[in-house]
Structures are given as C-alpha cells and as structure tokens.
Amino acid sequence: MSQVSAFFEKVRNVLGAGLPETRNLSGAYLWLFRVLGFIFAVYFLFGAVNGSYTFFGPRSWTGLQDLRTLEFPYLIEVGIYEFSKNLYGEQFMLPLFIFFTCALTYLIYPARKNSPTDRPSSIDLILIVLSFLVLCDFMYFYEPRGDRAGIVVDTGFWGNDVMFGFVAAVLVWECCRRVLGMVLPSVAFVFLFYDWAGNWFPGIIAHKGNDFGYVMSYLYSQEGIYGIITRVYAQVVFIFMIFGALLEATRVGDVFVNLSFALVGRFKGGAAKASVVSSGLVGSIVGSGAANIVITGTFTIPLMKKGGFRPTFAAATEAVSSIGGHLMPPIMASTAFILAAMTETPYWKVALISLVPAMLYYLSVFMSVHFYATRHGLRGLTKDELPDFWKIMREDGILLVPVGLLIFLLILQFSPFFAGFWAIVAAIVFATIREKCWYLLGIETLVFVASLIKGGDMLYLYTIIGCLLAWRQQQSKEIMIRIANAFVQGSKNSLIIGATAGVMGLVLTGVTHPDLAQKMTLIILSYSYDMIWLAVILVALASYILGMGMTITASYILIIILAGPALQDLGLKMLTSHMIVLWLSQDAALTPPFALGAFVAAGIAKCDPMRTGFTSLKLAKPLYVVPLLMAYTPILMDSPNPGSTAEWSSVLLVWLGASLGFICSAAVLEGQFLRTLTVFDRVLLSIASLLLFWEQLGEWDRIWFNSVGLTLMVISLVIQKLGNMKGKDDNSETMSAQPVG
C-alpha cells in the first residue's frame, strides 16, 4: 500500500491536483486585493437587489414626465435607477465576473512555486491589464456579439473577435490552472484541440474540424466563456458564497458543531455521529466540501481519534459527511444551481426532490459509524464533555435565523437570488443583534424603512449614507470591518467557482461544435444493450475516470453533457438523468487516487491518504446505489405535481425499503449488528440488502421484494439474538463450573 500511495502521490504532484497555496500579500498589493474583493462582493450583492424589487414595491417610474423631474433630488433618484438598471445587465455582469476572477487570482495565486510569495510578479500585472482590456472590449461590443457566435467579425483592433477570444481563452485557462491544478485545464485543451482538428481523430468520434477563427469567435460569446455556466455563477452562486463567508465569520459553523454534539454526542461513538450531523448541516450551506472539512474536521477529527476511532476511519467519516453536503438542501453547493438552470427546473423543486435521497445518504453513514463504534466498544462523550443545548440556543441561537429565513423563502418558491440576498441581510442584522450594537442596528432599520418608502432602487444610496453614519461609532466600525472582511473572504472563496466557470466555457465550445454528445450517446447505448442499470454503471465509470483531479461541479457538467442524452434516450426524464449524474460526480472527491476531500481530511488526521480514500469509498456506498433507485423508483418525485399525497406514499415505501437496505449493508461492511457477524450472518444480510434495494417499475413487485428482504433481515436478527442469549448462558455455566477460592 505504501508503494501505491507513493506512486499516486508523484502523479498528483505532476498534475497539480489539490488546493495550491496562496500568497501572503503585503503592503499596497494586499490593500488592492481587499479593495477589488470588496467591490466584487458588493457589486454582485446589490445586483441581487434587482431580483428583490417585489419585496420593495417596486416604485412606479411612469410619471417621469411630471414636473417633479425638475427637482434635483428626484433627478438623482432617476439617475441612480437608470444607472443601476443598466449596470446589472449581462453586458456588465458576465465580463465583470470573469475580470474580477482573473484579477484576484493573479494577485493571490502564484504561477509557480518559485514565484514571489508576498507580491504579484510583472507577468501577473500584465495578465491583470489584459483581463481589463478584454473586459472593455466585450462590454463595448456586447450588442453585436450576442447573436454572432461562430461568425468572425473584425472591426479593427478593438473589435477583433479572434484576437480577443484567444486572449480571453488564455486568461481563463491560466486562471484555472493556478486555482485548480492542471487536470481541468488539460481537459479543456483536449476538447478545444478536438474541435479544431476533428479530422485527425479515428472512428465514430471523427468530424471535419472547425476553423481556428470560428472556434475563437464561438468561445468569446454567450455560448462559450460567457455562457450559461458563467451566468448562473455570476447571478446566483456568488451570492451564496458571500452568505457562506458571513456565516463563517459569525461562527454559525461552530454553532452547528456544538448543537450536533449536544444532540448525539452522548451515544455510542458520539464524536463520529456528531461529525456526521454537523458536517451535513454545515455542508448544506457552505457550498464547498473541502471548506466544510476544514471548518468541522479541525474540531471533530481530533475528538474522534481521542474517542478510539482509527485515524483513517475518523478522516473518512468527516470527508464523506462533508462531501454529502453537496447533496443536502437547501443550498446543495453550486452544482444544484447549474442543474436547475440546465433543466429549466425551479430551484425549490430541485431542493425538494433532493431531500429524501440526501436523508438516505446520511442514514447510511450514520449507521456505519454506529456499527463500527458498537464492534469496537467505543463510548459516547460524558455529560461534562458535552455542550449544553439550551445554553447554545440562548447565546447563539439567534445566528441560525438567517438559515431558517433562507429555507423559508425557498419553500415559498422565491428565486434563489432573492432568498440569498435577504438571507445575507438577515445574517448582517442578527450578527449586529448578537453583538448588541444597537446604534448600528438603528441605522440598519432606518435604511430598510427608507428603502420601503422610497423604493428598492434607492437602497444603494441609503446604504452608503448609513455606513458613513455608523462609521462614527467604534463598535459599529468594528462590526462593519468584520462584515467587509467576510465579503473579501467570500470573493476569495469564489475564485474556485469563477475559474471553473471560465474554463468550462472552453470545454462546452469543444463539445458542442462536433456534436460529441451524440457520438457518446451512441457509444453508451451500444455497450449498455438498452439496459438502464448497465448505462448507469458506464456513466459511473466515466465519472470516475474523467472526474480525477477535477472539482465536483466541473465533473458534473462534463459528464451530463457527454452522457446525459444517452440516459434520456433510454427513457429517463431529463431531471432524473441530471440527478443521477450529480450523485455519481461526487465520487471525484472521495475515490482514490485523486480523492481531494479524503486527502484534506487525512491531512487533518495525520494518516495515510490512500487508506482514507478507500475507507471513504466504503462509507459512501449510497453514491452508487441511490442513482439506481432514481432510475427505477419514484424517489425523486419528478411528476408534474411533486409532493402530492399519492406520490409521497410511494416515496415513503421506497425510502423505508432503501433505509433497511442501507442498514443491512452497513452492518455487513462493518461486521457488526446485534453481535459480531459470522459468515452466515453476512450472507443472509447481504441477500436481504439486495432484495430491499431491488426495485421494479411495478409497485406490487416492489412490495414483494421488500417483504422478502425484510423477512430475511428479521430472521437474521432473531438468529443473532438467540446466539447472544446462548453465549450468555454458556458464559454463566463456565463461571459456575469454575472452582471457588
């Protein structure tokens, strides 16, 4: 195992997989990064206000012909309204998102290991200037570019699509390389090369190839770099990155961890069970599995090791639980927003149908931890070691209100950017209340009331005035600095999604032109023999291979483009196909040899990364079972009327059967149930698990299989119980037969 680990460690170093180290900027460059990061956050935060006008009124601007337009204050209002209306159109938002991503990346991420560690190099500054020139060109020539993807237009230096398209491609490629390593940029290069030189390829994947200018013009449009991926990230996902940074700054993650320990810490293996619960809660709102591992794992992993868990099992538990946050509503990381946009499904529906599968995932992990703790005799934490639940709620419970508001707004079917914006506002307000800064709270209230009266378009002006007033008071000043730092941290955290968005535009360009998706569909259909389960296995294999060293979002987008049409041709609905690929793409963070999530957790636990990866694979078995349930059962509630009584009854039946199946499989893998399992016990429970998982399209077949599986499970439990009783009797007889004295 050590030789294998060493080999893959060398491979990972060559490919640059993992999270590169950032610079420790100082002086003017540090302030430049902070200013750009703050502007980045504020711009897109107030961009969400455009989607929040329904809350404010909005104001009617039909009376512009009124004599009041001659009044100077009203002219200011009109000017701000018109300016903001144009400033947050796609003409500005999309290129600005790419520009800020590139500029901040070149400032904070070095190009090589021997690059300056406290300042950007001259090359970095040149790249920032080029990013600004591309920004200006795209905004100035936006209107003609909207519908001319693939049509080369040359209007001189400033309108040369080929030149600026090539520069933009190089900028986002280099940006992704610095942030995410070489894997995803290499994939993008291969697809672009395939688009250009398709006639060099053999067999079914060959095509005539496209002209270099055509390719550059296409990727430099709303169909390439500035396409749907960038649009969703800029308009929706970035808001939640700011929200996550605010929650981290206000210690909401710590509150979740403490509450989890207070609820389940006293049970067997309490530290690991608390890790499962807290990582699921934090992961559902943070949006990054690696960040979730760092937030919760630095506390839970040492406690698990102290409680008797093997370091590899402790790290794997944290990794699997944190990565599972990508599947847990309400936020589900950035991937769910992409899924909603690509399937044209309301986000609230995506969150609703994801709830039951996510519960199955965490139930399986929780039971694996329970059986492991039972087998090794690991106790829970004592009362003195546990935090007090009611004390936490009294002191910090108010910090959870923004999360509750977010869930409430999504349940009411408000748009994600609307819910995200007001969740951020709530996070700021309740953090102010938590610090008992009544002066700042009063100003925030006045800003809010003034916006209600005058219209949401004036929120910008009132916020600036409010900040100037609050700056005069020291406590308010300190809180505002903390909020500003959270905004900057949110911008820094968003560089991963920004780099992914830009380079995925290159990938989409290389996939769309040659109609590679159709070719991959034919290949999958020919090797699956029209069997859905075999097609799902092939997609899982493709996800594992192509997802090595890539982010989960990038892996999902690539696989759904290439393999999604094949699943739909086999009879699956579009939403079902996307959910299957979403689940399968999670293995990119847990499956060796490039299991980033497992390796981050292993670094905290100070244990072998490869062993941690294989242990994570065992714990994350729902990633491969639940997609089959999605394909053969109504577990996703993807009917025209999701959540109806009849549908919930069918889903409940599937959930009960699958839950028992996961309990049985967890027992088999850990070798423990009511007792340490014998070979016969494992065989019987394995058969029971398969029958409980086995789902047919017909409801009566499902009931029959589940009934037989349940019967075998009960028989196994009875045998184990009788065996335990017999063992106790034998021990009693042995003790009584021993001589006394």
Image: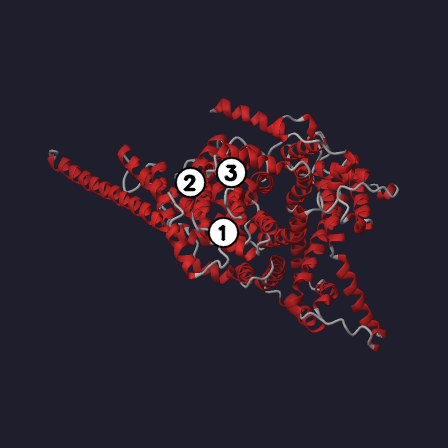
Task: Identify the mark at residue 354; answer none if there is no mark.
Answer: 1
Is residue 595 in sight in this rendering?
no
Location of residue 8 in the rendering, given as x and y in whole percent from the top left corner: 54, 26
CA separation in Å, label 2 and label 3: 28 Å
Query: Which element carries disc 2, helix, strand or loop?
Result: helix
Earlier sequence position, callout 2 versus callout 1:
2
Above or below, comparing residue 421 to residue 686 in the picture: below
Badge 1: residue crowd in 10 Å (few <14, some 14–19, many ≥20): many
Q: Earlier in the sequence, mark 2 or mark 3?
A: 2
* Location of mark 2 (residue): 306
Instruction: Name the residue nearer the viewer: 114 or 44.
Output: 44
Residue nearest the viewer, comparing 359 with 265: 359
The residue under label 3 is 587
Circle 2 residues within 10 Å: few <14, some 14–19, many ≥20: few
| Residue 11 placement (x, y as % from top left) | 58, 26
User: Would you place residue 115 above or below residue 466 in this image?
Assistant: above
Q: Position of residue 291 (x, y in %)?
A: 57, 44
**Gap in Å between the C-alphas at discs 2 and 1?**
34 Å
- Spatial CA span between label 3 and label 1: 17 Å
Q: In this view, does 366 lie to the left or right of 717?
A: right
In the image: residue 419, left or right of residue 216: left
Give the amino acid at mark 1. Answer: Ser
Quick check: can you spot residue 684? yes
Answer yes or no: do the residues labelled 2 and 1 have beta carbons within 8 Å?
no
Asked which secondary structure carries label 1, the reply is helix
Q: What element carries label 3?
A: helix
Earlier sequence position, callout 3 versus callout 1: 1
Q: In front: mark 3 or mark 1?
A: 1
